[in-house]
Amino acid sequence: MGLARVGGLTDARSRAAATASTMTRLMLGRTLERICKGVLLLCLVHFVIMMILYFDVYSQRFDIFSRFNNGRGANASRAAGAHHYYYYNSTRPNATFANFLATADQLLASGRPEANHTPPTPKPIPPCPEVPPGLVGRLLIEFSSMMTFERVLRENPNVTEGGKYTPHDCRAKQKVAIIIPFRHREHHLKYWLHYLHPILRRQKIDYGIYIINQLGEDTFNRAKLLNVGYTEALKDGEYDCFIFSDVDLIPMDDRNLYHCYDQPRHFAIAMDKFGFRLPYAGYFGGVSGLSKKQFLKINGFPNEYWGWGGEDDDIYNRITLNGMKVSRPDVKIGRYRMIKHERDKHNEPNPQRFIKIQNTKNTMRKDGISSLMYRVVSVKRYALYTNISVEIGKPPPRPLRG
């Protein structure tokens, strides 16, 4: 009896183990079956999506070509009807399905009538910042290295014919004409262009450079040449700001911004030849700037200062007599280096300058831009500047002494 009971228990346990093993296999099989069904379903969904996209693009292409073929007969009778046939090369290298879709969209767009085609609105250009971020501050200015126009041209590839430049990434609030009175100073001009073009570009100035060349060997007249430059620049562009600069003065700090201000601007307030200080309170020489409105308010510059000296003080008097004040940069920023040179021939000091300065109030309404007379001989637009050669007449005979 005891042995029979033991045998029965053993058989029961064996049957239970077999049943458990069978259940485990069934559960595993069902799990694998579900996974396979899920993979098959996913593949089916993927296949359906691909077919939908394929037939959608195919139908678009078929519709496009149908339009072109239908339009060919209609356009055949038009005298000026130019035909354009489009195709998609599915065998081109690096072609992808995304490229294919993009090309189909382009074909659809090109197939629409031109009247319904609206070009994309260009993104507005922001105004240039008051203080451009690319400024470097104090500059090292030296005149010992060899300088050529070819070198300056290589350094400034973005400057266009006539010495013009417009910022590409922002909109300047002013259009500036930079005017230089000139005669026999080619050596100085190379250095001036070498330094000023990069400075002006960093300052985000929309500018053009005008060299006003006095022909002949008569006495030099700086102020009259500046009047000529103002007049000729306005024939060449819609300028609203004018910077008047001597060719031998280079700014030592690019934070000295070359644009016009609410008041007439004197830029060169601290030259090396004056020990980097203003020589006297009424000094307005070297480099100055006036807006068009300010320039016309003082009737421009005097035309009767032949020879060196006096015209700057006359201009200062015109400004103050018309209720304006001269603005200046900080002395640390308004520093300039002068290219050393001998005084030009036929530019001797004007002995009448002191008398003329005292009479500015009486002469400024009749002597200035309103009475300017000259003759343009040639206008040449070089890569880095515009050269305007002029005849400005002869000085009146000086009164005999005694």
Image: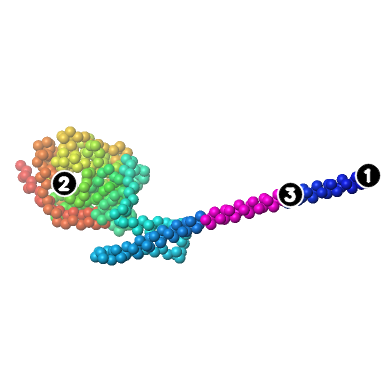
Amino acid type indicated by mark 1 = Gly
Is residue 224 at least partly visible in the picture? yes
On the image, the x and y values in percent for residue 276 come to 29, 40
Nearest to viewer (mark 3 / mark 1): 1
Asked if residue 38 lies in the magenta stretch, the reply is: yes
The part of the chain drawn in magenta is 26-48
- Using the image, tell me which numbered label, if any, was put on residue 2: 1
- Label 3 element class: helix
Near mark 3 (Cα within 10 A), the count class, few <14, some 14-19 or many ≥20, is: few
Type of secondary structure dominating the magenta stretch: helix
Nearest to viewer (mark 3 / mark 2): 3
- Label 2 element class: helix
Q: CA distance from mark 3 to mark 2?
A: 105 Å
On the image, the x and y values in percent for residue 6 come to 90, 46
Earlier sequence position, callout 3 versus callout 1: 1
Disc 2 target residue: 227
Q: In the visual, does 12 lie left or right of 82? A: right
Q: In the visual, does 339 lie left or right of 393? A: right
Earlier sequence position, callout 1 versus callout 2: 1
Please state which of residues 112 and 148 is positioned toward the viewer in this rendering.
112
Nearest to viewer (mark 1 / mark 2): 1
Position above or below: 329 against 154: above
Quarter of the picture containing the N terminus is top right
Amino acid type indicated by mark 2 = Asn
- Label 1 element class: helix
Disc 3 target residue: 24
- Using the image, tell me which numbered label, if any, was put on residue 310: none
On the image, the x and y values in percent for residue 250 come to 28, 47
Residue in the image at 34% along x and 46% along y: 139
